[in-house]
Image (cartoon, helix red, strand yellow):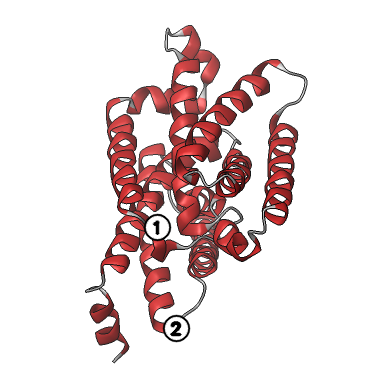
Amino acid sequence: MILNDFFSMLSYDFVIKALLVGVCISLCSSLLGVNMVLKNKAMIGDGLSHVAFGACAIAACLNWAPLLVSIPVVVIAAFVILKLSEKSKIHGDSLIALFASSSLAIGYIVIKLGGLNKDLDSYLYGNIYMISTTELILTLVLTVVVIASFIIFYNRIFSITFDEDFSKSSGIKTELYNVIISVLCAFTVVIGMKVMGTLLITSLIVFPVLSARQIFKTYKHVVIASAVISVLCFVIGIFTNLAVDLPVGATIVVINLIVFLILLITGIIRKRIRVV
């Protein structure tokens, strides 16, 4: 009965849009997340999502299109974070925390002053069933660009992920590729806010990669496995939401957590078997 209800829901346009956007964002997040997690820059997604929250809040108060405002703002923020982390005295998590906390505070104040309290949950936790046609098109284009970038520049991305100094000495333009990855991450975070919200979007970047690393050790296998895990967790999350009416974003995070714990335990058991 539940399965029949699920397939009947697929006849609705908003459900199809939600599935398409969610699968694409899950795929993009996991692919970009491999580079960011392995370089210990995973929390940059959290910082960018908070910047996007502040930009969306300001745009909403001014009756501007949140997406058109937040995308350039977050892209600029990604570029600034990247440059400051290389040249300033504030590095890593401290710099990201500075951007994240400041942007969240500004956004919250703007929402309160603008009387937009009713929209706070949609900014913080997402509203996947309110995907517009424009957001769907942007997501599809972003997905094509991310996948094409990984296929075309696979060897260079692999190189800068593990040894940036060696890559630079080999003639690879590491700064350019870091900027490209950061900009793609910025686009993914902004659009992904509609799926997961400000507070949960980072989970799509971190969890699938950590889960894949519990079983697989080579870069190629981790990339493929994290993409598969991310998409499967999202689809299960949507199915669960339609069947039980649980919060979509939180459900997807919990499913990712369960998968991570299962693979973590599996990895530990495999190691002990090999030792024995």
Three-letter residue code for mark 1 = Ile
Image coordinates for residue 17, horizontal then vertical, percent: 30, 60
* Nearer the observer, 274 or 22: 22
Residue at position x 26%, y 67% in the image: 13
> Judging from the image, what secondary structure is the residue with disc 1 in?
helix
* Nearer the observer, 116 or 168: 116
* Nearer the observer, 158 or 175: 175
Disc 1 crowd rating (10 Å Cα; few below 14, some 14-19, many 20+) is: many
Q: Which residue is mark 2?
A: 244
Residue at position x 63%, y 59% in the image: 116
Three-letter residue code for mark 2 = Val
Question: Which sits earlier in the primary sequence, circle 1 or circle 2?
Answer: 1
* Nearer the observer, 219 or 56: 56
Is 25 rendered above or below residue 261?
A: above
Q: Which residue is mark 1?
A: 229
Q: Quadrant of residue 121?
A: bottom right
Between marks 1 and 2, how big is the CA–CA gap?
22 Å
Residue at position x 28%, y 85% in the image: 5
Image coordinates for residue 138, horizontal then vertical, percent: 33, 43
